[in-house]
Image (spheres, rainbow, N blue to C red):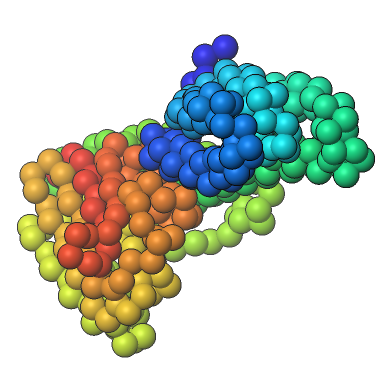
């Protein structure tokens, strides 16, 4: 089955595969290689002092294991087999090295395999790693057997913990997307309902003056046409988002139409009340924007300002810029705070970033967020628009 075709539930159930990013793979290699060289390499040098003739071969086998770990993130099963064979060979050459230490690289590979591959695959690998247990019993007795089995099981369990942690993060991200879509759907519903109400009023007015003032009737009909086009555009967005949950207690609840960029100064004032300096710059006019785009831009600014208040350590100033550039609106929010590690990256897993990205995507736009080279954090969105006459 193609990896991209797996459903989210497969991931939660532990049946999907996920290779780490190149950066994570390099970090895994450097960390595991350093561990093997420090622990196993030292043990081999100490044990090989009494067997000088076997020392070069044992050192070569250690280096083979270290090199094999380079591909542990891509092919953990193959690396596990190679490092296990090399580790057993080291133990055969230098029996004074414990079997647990000789198979250290294999245990690292087992941990990686448990974190990356489906549980049924890692369980078979765990069983295979338990096969040398009688050798550890023969060499170290019950204590040696217990230590070996404990380290193998702990390596497998650590991989399962990491796998569950990633699955939980993905689940929270998906839930945030669903919640954001539901909220967008409710807001678009309000916008469309408002537009249709105006159309009904315009239609009644056109009927009243149709014979006496035909030009005024034509204006009302043109307004109805414009409103209908706008409503159709909003309904397309509604169809792309999840509908509101009928059981959320909101049925029949009267809600005001969502805020817009026209109320951006009010939003800035609420942030200024906390002591933060907020600069709002406008370039071009945002009048006549489709309601969904207007609302998405406002919500992106709102969430970015909220993130600044919550996460921007030391921030005391934030600049908001809204630029209407022909066929798109660009929204930029930049603060001057220090960027904590958890806030770095353009595709963070925080619900705030997920919500902003989802809003931009649903109107056909894009959003990027990340720390700036000179300090501070930037959220930049590009939202395409089709002007409503």
Where is residue 205 drawn, in percent x and y?
28, 50
Residue 383 seen in the current view: yes
In-image side of 289 versus 270 (left or right):
left
Place residue 82 in its image quadrant.
top right
Horizontal relation, residue 261 to residue 5: left or right: left
**Residue 45, percent across and down?**
56, 40
Q: Position of residue 55 (x, y in %)?
A: 55, 30
Q: Give residue 88's position: percent from left, percent from top.
A: 68, 24
Total labels drawn: 0
Instruction: State left or right for residue 219 relative to residue 249.
Output: left
| The N terminus, quarter of image | top right
Which residue is at 88% across, 30% downward? 138
Quarter of image, res 311: bottom left
Q: Residue at x 66, y 25 (%)?
A: 93
Residue that sits furthest to the top in the current view: 1
186 versus 12 height, above or below: below
Along the viewing direction, whichever of 183 and 54 lies nearer the viewer? 54
| Residue located at (49% from left, 39% from top) | 33
Above or below for 88 versus 174: above
- Left or right: residue 330 compared with residue 58: left
Any part of residue 186 in sight? no
Which residue is drawn at the image coordinates 51% and 27% (left, top)?
56
Q: Quadrant of the C terminus?
A: top left
Residue 119 picture quarter: top right
Depth check: 65 or 350 in front?
A: 65
Residue closer to the observer: 128 or 119:
128
């Amino acid at each position: 089955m193609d990896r991209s075709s797996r459903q989210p539930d497969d991931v939660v159930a532990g049946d999907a595969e996920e290779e780490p990013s190149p950066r994570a793979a390099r970090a895994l290699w450097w960390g595991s290689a350093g561990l093997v060289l420090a622990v196993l390499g030292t043990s081999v040098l100490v044990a090989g002092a009494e067997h000088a003739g076997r020392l070069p071969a044992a050192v070569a086998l250690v280096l083979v294991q270290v090199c094999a770990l380079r591909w542990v993130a891509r092919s953990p099963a193959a690396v596990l087999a190679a490092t296990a064979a090399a580790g057993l060979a080291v133990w055969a050459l230098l029996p004074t090295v414990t079997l647990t230490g000789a198979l250290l690289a294999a245990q690292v590979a087992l941990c990686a395999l448990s974190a990356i591959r489906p549980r049924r695959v890692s369980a078979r690998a765990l069983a295979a790693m338990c096969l040398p247990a009688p050798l550890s019993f023969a060499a170290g007795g019950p204590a040696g057997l217990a230590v070996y089995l404990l380290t193998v099981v702990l390596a497998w369990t650590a991989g399962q913990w990491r796998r569950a942690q990633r699955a939980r993060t993905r689940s929270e991200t998906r839930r945030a997307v669903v919640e954001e879509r539901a909220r967008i759907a409710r807001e678009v519903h309000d916008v469309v309902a408002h537009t249709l109400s105006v159309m009904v009023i315009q239609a009644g007015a056109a009927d009243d003056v149709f014979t006496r003032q035909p030009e005024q009737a034509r204006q009302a009909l043109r307004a109805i046409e414009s409103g209908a086009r706008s409503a159709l555009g909003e309904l397309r967005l509604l169809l792309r988002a999840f509908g509101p949950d009928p059981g959320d207690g909101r049925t029949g609840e009267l809600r005001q139409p969502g805020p817009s960029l026209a109320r951006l100064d009010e939003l800035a004032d609420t942030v200024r009340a906390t002591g933060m300096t907020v600069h709002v710059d406008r370039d071009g006019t945002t009048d006549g924007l489709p309601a969904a785009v207007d609302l998405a831009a406002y919500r992106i600014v709102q969430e970015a300002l909220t993130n600044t208040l919550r996460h921007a350590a030391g921030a005391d100033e934030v600049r908001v810029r809204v630029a209407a550039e022909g066929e798109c609106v660009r929204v930029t929010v930049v603060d001057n705070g220090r960027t904590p590690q958890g806030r770095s990256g353009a595709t963070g897993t925080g619900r705030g970033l997920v919500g902003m990205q989802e809003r931009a995507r649903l109107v056909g736009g894009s959003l990027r967020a990340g720390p700036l080279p000179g300090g501070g954090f930037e959220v930049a969105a590009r939202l395409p628009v089709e002007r409503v006459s």
